[in-house]
Image (tube, rainbow, N blue to C red):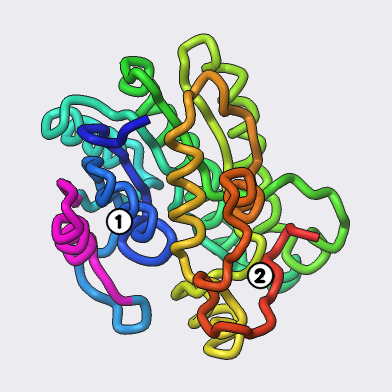
């Protein structure tokens, strides 16, 4: 599939993985809608919806930056309405926005539990629901959710059960949507990295520069997303992909260019054995 004149709505595309996917698709000619909260730059995180839009347009794409907190259904609908008004429809939805807290049961405050569920689960569901009427009109509609293969090994639950629940919920919704909307020609897949990715979350919340230097860049997920989203929707749906698997299918096995530090030992991401 050509991405020329196709419209991709990406949640949380201000920075990191979301922005990398946005830039990749923009270079291929796609229109990009950045739906995220940041309108003023946080020094620890960097970037706003406006700076991301500027990068996308510099890469040759058309960008629409809309402030949106996906916990609020009215804000989601405004994003969809403005997208249709500007670009005429929606062909691709990337559910990237997510909250993380790797805390045990006793350490997880109610407000943090609620935040993860309201963004990762409820928000992802409501954004997808709002986009479905437009996706049904597309000639090759795709939903791509950044969530992992469902892995029932207890080790993925014992240290951060609240977070794990939300990410597996995102993957289970993906499986459900693939079946529910197959008749409508809408593909639904999930994508997850084999290794940790150098993002603000890794640098600020998880492992700092040490873990970042044992990670890959977000561009590996952007490239994997590109290969998934260009597939015929009827033939590529219901998969919980890992980035290396997607690239290997395309004959890409030398992944050294994605390493933050070439030759460094890489750290395996959560939920991947």
Label 1, residues with CA under 10 Å away: few <14, some 14-19, many ≥20:
many
**Residue with the mark numbered 1:** 23
Q: Does residue 192 appear in the picture of this structure?
A: no
Q: Say which quarter of the image contains residue 51.
A: bottom left
Q: Quadrant of the C terminus?
A: bottom right
Label 2, residues with CA under 10 Å away: few <14, some 14-19, many ≥20:
some
**Residue with the mark numbered 2:** 102
Closer to the N terminus: mark 2 or mark 1? 1
Q: Say which quarter of the image contains residue 55.
A: bottom left
Say if 83 sits above or below 270 in the image: above
- Between tags 2 and 1, which lies in front? 1
Say if 271 sits above or below 240 in the image: below
Q: Is residue 56 magenta?
A: yes
The answer to which of 138 and 174 lies nearer the viewer is 138
Q: x%, y% of residue 196?
A: 61, 70
Q: x%, y% of residue 73?
A: 35, 37
At x 16%, y 52%, the residue is 60
The answer to which of 150 and 4 lies nearer the viewer is 4
Magenta region: which residues?
46-65
At x 60%, y 68%, the residue is 101
Q: Does residue 79 appear in the picture of this structure?
A: yes
Image check: 20 left or right of 271? left
Q: Say which quarter of the image contains residue 244.
A: bottom right
At x 56%, y 36%, the residue is 189
């Amino acid at each position: 599939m050509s991405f020329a004149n196709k419209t991709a709505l990406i949640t949380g595309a201000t920075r990191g993985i979301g922005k990398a996917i946005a830039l990749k698709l923009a270079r291929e000619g796609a229109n990009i809608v950045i739906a995220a909260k940041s309108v003023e730059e946080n020094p620890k995180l960097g970037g706003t919806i406006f700076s991301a839009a500027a990068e996308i347009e510099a890469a040759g794409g058309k960008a629409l930056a809309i402030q949106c907190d996906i916990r609020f259904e009215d804000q989601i609908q405004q994003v969809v309405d403005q997208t249709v008004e500007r670009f005429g429809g929606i062909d691709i939805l990337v559910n990237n926005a997510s909250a993380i807290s790797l805390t045990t049961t006793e350490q997880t405050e109610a407000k943090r539990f609620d935040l993860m569920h309201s963004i990762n689960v409820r928000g992802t569901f409501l954004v997808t629901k709002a986009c479905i009427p437009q996706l049904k009109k597309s000639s090759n509609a795709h939903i791509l959710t950044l969530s992992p293969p469902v892995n029932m090994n207890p080790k993925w639950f014992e240290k951060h059960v609240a977070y794990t629940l939300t990410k597996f919920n995102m993957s289970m919704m993906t499986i459900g949507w693939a079946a529910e909307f197959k008749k409508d020609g809408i593909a639904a897949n999930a994508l997850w990295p084999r290794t940790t990715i150098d993002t603000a979350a890794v640098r600020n919340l998880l492992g700092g520069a040490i873990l970042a230097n044992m990670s890959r860049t977000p561009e590996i997920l952007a490239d994997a997303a590109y290969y998934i989203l260009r597939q015929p929707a009827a033939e590529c749906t219901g998969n919980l992909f890992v980035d290396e698997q997607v690239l290997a299918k395309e004959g890409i096995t030398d992944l050294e260019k994605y390493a933050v530090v070439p030759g460094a030992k890489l750290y395996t991401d959560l939920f991947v054995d």
